[in-house]
Image (tube, rainbow, N blue to C red):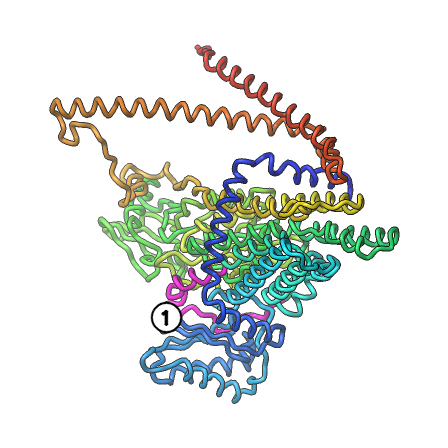
Amino acid sequence: MSLSGLVPSVVGLVSAPVGALGGAVRDATTTAVQAGRAAQQALRSVPGDLAEAAAVLADAGKQRGRRRVWRRGGRAYVEVRGLTGNGESHERLRSDVTAALRAVKGVHWAEVNAVLGQVVVDLSEDDTGLDKVLDVVMTLEEAHGTDDDPFSGTGPMPPFATAPAALAKAALVADCVALGVAAVRQVTPLPAFPAMLRVPVVMTESHPLLRRLVENRLGKPHAAVVISVSSATVHALTDGVAPVALDTVQRVWQLAEIRARQGVWHAREHELVPGGEGLPPRIAGWLPRPVPLPPGPVEKCGERTSMASVLGAGGLLAWTGSLDTAARAILATAPKAAGMGREAFSALLGRDLAGAGAVPMDAEALRVLDRVTTVLIDSTVLCTSRPRLLEAASTGELDEAEVWSAAHNVLAGRSVADLSHPGPWTADGWRLQRAAGTGSRRPDDPEGMPLDLYDAAGIVQGRILAGCDLDPLADALVGAARSGGRGLLLTEHAGAGELLPWADRVLPAGTSAVAEVRRLQADGDVVLVVATGDDHALAAADVGVGVLPPPGVPGHPCWSADIICGPGVEQVWRILVAVDEARQVSGRSAHLSMGGSALGALIAAAGRRRTMLGLTTSPVYGAAFLAQLGALRAARRLAGRPLPPRRVRGTWHALGARETLGVLHHPGRPKATSGTAAETGGTGPEAVEATRRALAAAARFTAGATGLRSAAHGAGQLATAVREELRDPLTPVLALGAAASAAVGSTIDSALVGGVMAGNAVISGAQRARAERALNALLLTQQTPRAW
């Protein structure tokens, strides 16, 4: 690890609690309360969940034989062996399964979802049981010779699966038991096992290569539980309270995310699958990523720190000849904070997105947001179901303005669905009719919908191009996609022509989005795709965000997407904004992790050990706690961020007064109200006196509030000024020296350096804040000279 990377890492570890002391205490308290409530709720019905978790773990791996079945109300989702997604055998099995189940008494319909490898059955609870459906499926599997085929054991679990919750509960129970055992061992004379016992588990958990080997064999959910239970066991036997406590909090957030995914699926299942329509009967052949997914800040931190840890432990072993010393060096430098920060943020983000209506089909996609470098948006997503007049040309006696007005009058109040039939469409003696040779084009087509304008006498007076109105959040969506230096690609679309210049590149109509995604991935980019009907591009993307079509527009959910949003783009905007937050959280967590590992290495090299209990026993665990706390604050800040102002775009210069009022009119807008005495009916002396007293009380309250607001503003100015002073180039050097002194036991020297540094920052910050207030006061008294 170079000095240029080590200094900011240690500074981040040392200065993180200083920069956010007040918020950190508040968030830590709230976190503890929420974690306690979530743990209490999660530990209910534990025996049944533990039994299911044991059955799931026993069937882990690529050769999974346990069938996933989900039923709620009259819907049942049943996995079928042999539904590979494409090929002749798949088609025969799909046809026979759906035909056989539809013939069962009480079954309303049955359709295959090839993406999930399941058959969805809508049945009557009174006439047909799930056992009958399973008997039919198993009979057909045996007839087609697929009864011995395994299910996919390494793919993502759908949101309705019960296995993730059972596995998370099992891990949480193991952490709680281990935490109790470790706490008891701290106050009892029971002998503790040597710390060397932790090394295999800690190395597997923190080293990306070793963890990837376990995940490829068992699958990510199963590997996480196995590693978690193993870690809880060895830390309980070796008096490791701090790591078990951190793992317990992380498990609570993961369980909350899983519960939110299940809840949003239960709420929106009938909307996503209204009546067996829109389920993909087959999928195209899936091609692997052309190159491996590039490492992000967390992966780079894990690889570098793990390699340095192994080399350092080897050097200590060669120097001292003590296995215990080498083992403690590995434990003191484990990069725990990097992964914990990203995992906490991703779990909280997934919970918040699901709570707002988004359906995360693959929760692991949220863990890739910190690596996204390019965003590809299908411009159809930016359009609504309202038609808009894009172009108009006069072909008769009318001028262009009159053509605009007449055509707009015919289109007013209509939807895209209204313009889907052959036509014509009339209003006030004017008629719009499809132009010859345009076929069945619609306003939401990329090329738009050409129409001819006829007058009452049947004479063509103009030719117009109808498209779709832009979503009021389209500008905000494009801005969020471009922020952070990411590349932006938009597909060519007539309705989004005003936003296409903002893209780095525009894909012409008819261009294969899948080929473009693969090309970008081959160049080293991590691609996020936002689309409303391109299942293939969403399947190829590193993060696929599928958007449901607006009401009245034909379409179906993109089951290949990692996250299903909409209708509307509010959640899409929040996901794009979360990309910046995810990158910052991962970067800060990586810096904290490297700082904690560096300080742990100094402690191990000095041969000193801390004796205090809690998270301060090791810089590694302190850094992990700060990373989790920072992730919590980032997720809350993102969840509380209001939607940006909506912008209504249009060809305002070509609209008349009536057309402009029609565009701006919103029937649901509340009417303005006033509280004057004349409007409320109070005009007598009593009403006047009551009004006077109310105004006096309001004035006193406003004066008090103004004083509090001024005090808070002054404190905020001081904190900002102190933070600016700490950005001095000498601060990293002094902080590194203070941290190193504390690590080797020279607490007096560390306190002196830290005290001088903090005191200088406070004094200089106060002077800066006072000077800024004085300057602002002088500027307020200035009179700007008037230019004549």
Q: How many marks?
A: 1
The vertical placement of 82 against 397, above or below, is below
Q: Is 244 included in the stretch rendered in magenta?
A: no
What amino acid type should be assigned to the residue bearing mark 1?
Gly
Q: Give the left or right position of residue 273, taking residue 455 as reference.
A: right
Where residue 232 sits: x, y (%)? Answer: 63, 61
Vertical placement of 417 versus 650: above or below?
A: below
Spot occupied by residue 28 in the image (x, y as percentages of width and height): 53, 44
The residue segment tinted magenta is 258-287
Residues 607 and 383: in front is 607
Residue 283 lies in magenta, yes or no?
A: yes
Residue 520 visible, this angle: no
Mark 1 — residue?
275
* Residue displayed at 68% across by 37% down: 11
**Residue 742 versus residue 568: which sits nearer the camera?**
742
From this view, report whether residue 472 is shown above or below residue 359.
above
Picture coordinates of residue 669, whole percent (x, y): 28, 42
